[in-house]
Image: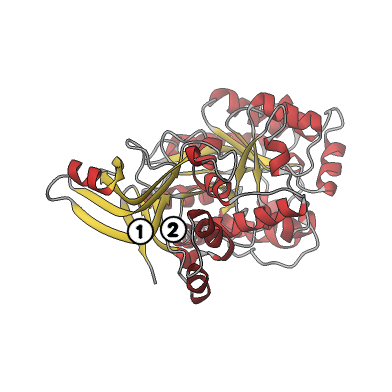
Amino acid sequence: MTQTLVRGRLLSFVRRPQAIDDTASYRYEEDGGLLVEDGRIVAAGPYTTVRAEAAADAEEIDHRPHLILPGLIDTHLHFPQMQVIGSYAANLLEWLNTYTFPEECRFVESEHAARIARHFYDEMIRHGTTTAVAYCSVHKASADAYFAEALKRGMRMVGGKVMMDRNAPQGLLDTPQIGYDETRAVIAEWHGKGRNHVAITPRFAITSTPAQMEMTAALAREFPDLHIQTHLSENHDEIRFTGELYPDAIDYTDIYAKYGLLGPKSLFGHCIHLSEREADAMSEAGAVAVHCPTSNLFLGSGLFPLKALSRREKPVRIGVATDIGGGTSYSMLKTMDEAYKIQQLLGERLNPFESFYHMTLGNAEALSLSDHIGTLEAGTDADFVVLDAAATPAMALKMEVTRSLTDELFLLQTMGDDRAVRETYVAGKAMKAAL
């Protein structure tokens, strides 16, 4: 098998940074080498050491002086909402009813779903995202298109057919039985095929009847290793309406707990307005709160207390995500730029090492996939990204006075976007050259 030796400045994390000077939390090689074979990383470290391990005929690719990091990971977005992004609305529920639900009705057509899937994966690769967790539409055709395209590109992707049987247009409703049967069919056809992971996906409690939630609970019991994804406590009106629909529940989080959906592979989008009881329940279950900063700001949903949730006596696991199309950028760099600003408004500091940890190892840990992705460790998938902190004239000018790795990362986070992505590698294969 042919080997590839990729040279550049390597940065990866071994745990969450405790402070800006926590150098033990990451590994950095000024002149590093990644040895790749058969889609996996064989060795990583100083270039001279890795070069000595490589075969004599190994192909060598030199990305100096750019940074090489694990591929970026997006833990919550909506594949059918590419043409919803940038839609003008006052709040979440108006935005869903006016723009999102009508758009998602189009995904009953296999040809449309396949076309948008191609664009979706193009954008992921262009922005350096090598793994994402997506909601498809209620139609099985959308999930088929999503996973077929992931298989074609060899990407490790998580996704699910949405289950919803009320409070949406007729063209977007399944039934408890259809939602169950079609989710089972998607699991049978796609889970474990290539690098695909199927997630059980009730959209949120507002759009599922108790009967459908029972079917969701049955799926969770039958497939305990699968991810579960839904939404939680994004908007005050949503929380109020949910309480009216489930009057017997203690609170919003309790609804999901009653149906067995609160666990270590459960991904809850937003979680902005959790009570202390809810945060305790999530912590005890090991469930993940997924922060979607550009979406939260765009829809006026609120400020996510990332730092406060992390330092609780019972800390809550955190993921970060774009939430396209409520979110306004496909870039995880822009996502963390907005996350930084939200923490500033809350009187907190989010240092650039934490930001890059969240985009890589942190999100891999949130997905329970850090043995495969999110690192540059030998034996893991060769998904990585090459970043150029001087990608635009304005960035290059700033780089003239940048004197540390900390400053370079903060520049990438603050001014970077898809133009800073020089190359995205999936399973060791370069997927996009810089324009």
- Check disc 2 and report the residue beneath it: 125
Residue 82 percent coordinates (x, y): 58, 62
Q: Residues within 10 Å of mark 1 (few under 14, many from 20)?
A: some
- Check disc 1 and report the residue beneath it: 431
Give how far apart the Cα atoms at labels 1 and 2 are: 7 Å
Q: Amino acid at mark 2?
A: Ile
Q: Nearer the viewer, residue 408 or 279?
A: 408
Q: Nearer the viewer, residue 7 or 243?
A: 7
Residue 117 percent coordinates (x, y): 48, 57
Q: Nearer the viewer, residue 174 or 396?
A: 396
Q: Earlier in the sequence, mark 1 or mark 2?
A: 2
Q: Residues within 10 Å of mark 2 (few under 14, many from 20)?
A: many
Is residue 410 positioned above or below 156 on the image? below
Is residue 302 positioned above or below 103 on the image? above
Q: Are marks 1 and 2 in contact (CB under 8 Å)?
A: yes
Residue 209 percent coordinates (x, y): 75, 36
Q: Amino acid at mark 1?
A: Met
Point out the residue furthest to the left here. 56
Residue 333 percent coordinates (x, y): 55, 58
Query: On the rendered image, what quadrant is the C terminus found in?
Result: bottom left
Residue 222's label in the rendered image is none
Direction from residue 214 to residue 89 in the image, left or right: right
